[in-house]
Amino acid sequence: MSMTKKDIADLLVEQMGVNHNQALSMTNNFFDAIKASLAKGEDVKLSGFGNFIIREKVARPGRNPKTGEPVIISARKVATFKAGLKLKKATKLGV
């Protein structure tokens, strides 16, 4: 099962004692701050969790899978995530 923003907000309500609207607002603000930094081209480093990094991909030749016709895949920026050591260790141990 996956965790949603609502699940994170519910955890904040449970563990911090804030009301649900505040918790949802905090959660949305957190993700909006990450999104805004990435949109500016800045990397986001969360100590003990991992790094969100913007990578620039160059244009490359590709192929339309339906028709087999060659096409050019345009250059673009993509966000990638690299897990930190603590996160890797926690997932490996299943904690």
Image (cartoon, rainbow, N blue to C red):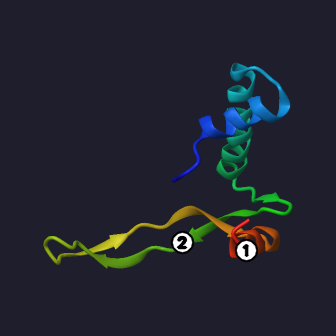
- Element on which disc 1 rests: helix
Is 55 above or below relative to 4? below
Residue that badge 1 annotates: 93
Checking the image for residue 51, the label placed there is none
**Residue sitting at x 73%, y 28%:** 23
Q: Residue furthest left?
A: 67
Is 88 above or below relative to 22? below
**Residue sitting at x 42%, y 66%:** 74
Q: In this rendered view, identify the residue nearer to me: 65 or 31.
A: 31
- Element on which disc 2 rests: strand
Coordinates of residue 24 in the picture (x, y in percent): 68, 28
Coordinates of residue 56 in the picture (x, y in percent): 59, 69
Query: How busy is the neighbourhood of tag 2: few (under 14 within 10 Å), some, or many (20 plus)?
Result: few
The tally of labels here is: 2
Residue 70 lies left or right of residue 30; in this view the side is: left
Residue 33 lies left or right of residue 60; in this view the side is: right
Query: How busy is the neighbourhood of tag 1: few (under 14 within 10 Å), some, or many (20 plus)?
Result: few
- Under mark 1, the amino acid is Leu
Q: CA distance from mark 2 to mark 1?
A: 34 Å
Coordinates of residue 79 in the picture (x, y in percent): 60, 61
Residue that badge 2 annotates: 57
Earlier-in-chain disc, 2 versus 1: 2
- Under mark 2, the amino acid is Lys
**Residue sitting at x 69%, y 33%:** 9
Query: In what quadrant of the picture does the C terminus appear?
Result: bottom right
Name which quarter of the figure residue 43 lies in.
bottom right
Q: In this rendered view, identify the residue nearer to me: 71 or 22.
A: 22
Coordinates of residue 61 in the picture (x, y in percent): 35, 79
Name which quarter of the figure residue 32 lies in.
top right
